[in-house]
Image (cartoon, rainbow, N blue to C red):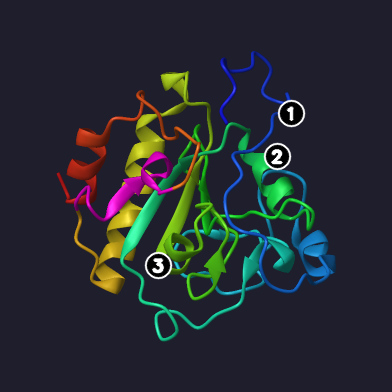
Amino acid sequence: MERPSSPRLPHTRRSLLRGGLALGAAAGTALAGELWTGGGRASAATTVDYPGAVWAPASTANYTASNRPTTYAIDMVVIHVTQETFADTITLFQDPAHAAAAHYVVRSADGAIDQCVHEHDVAWHAGNWDYNTRSIGIEHEGWVDDASWFTDAMYHASAALTAEICGKYGIPKDREHIIGHVQVPGTDHTDPGPNWDWVRYIRLVNGG
């Protein structure tokens, strides 16, 4: 559940919105530890699915290896807000005890995108196994109660990412298929919250 207010210091640790079900076998995180530079970016040692994204691998304990869309059709994008800083979000996704990770994380200041889980794998981000298998999860740095985190750079970068995902998998670019975490059945999360401009976002996804 989201905190009532946003922090004044960017390094304040908060509990990241927890998503996926803790299913599957847990593996070591040595590779993630080696690749992560600690400076907000990671080594591009593995091919990313989205051009311009930087590979910042989540612990293999925080997602389920798969072969989508062969094993599961992908028919939606789920929009999240981290309730945490960009760097700390990546660190949490690399913690095997966290039991959650999204496919992508978008940074507030400049729209930089890190990919943490490959699209063909099932990221644990939605808190609902069926929705996890069918979706790509995108986290956005910030707090739901503070609209200042949702910058122009973030909206444009995220919308371009979502548009590319929709084109790749034949997902309609509408609110029935691009949803907020709050819309996932069974969730108690409210992100992306009332400060997220859905009208603007969907317009950008559609090239407007």
Q: Quadrant of residue 164?
A: bottom left
Looking at this rendering, what residue extends furthest in the front direction?
Answer: 186
Which contiguous range is marked in magenta? 174-185
Tell me the residue at 58%/56% (across/down): 20
State the residue at coordinates (51%, 63%). 129
Residue drawn at (43%, 60%), measured in percent from left and top? Answer: 131
**Magenta stretch contains residue 180:** yes
Using the image, tell me which numbered label, if any, was put on residue 134.
3
The residue closer to the viewer here, 168 or 36, is 168
**Percent coordinates x, y for residue 94 in the rendering:** 74, 55
**Residue 88 numbered tag:** 2
Distance (Cα) linking label 3 and label 2: 26 Å
Residue at the disc numbered 1? 13
**Which amino acid type corresponds to the residue marked 1 in the rendered image?**
Arg
Q: Is residue 152 above or below residue 201?
A: above
Specify few, some or many for label 1: CA neighbours under 10 Å numbering under 14, 14-19, or 20 or more. few
Give percent across and percent down for residue 147. Answer: 41, 21
Q: Left of 105 or right of it: where is 164?
A: left
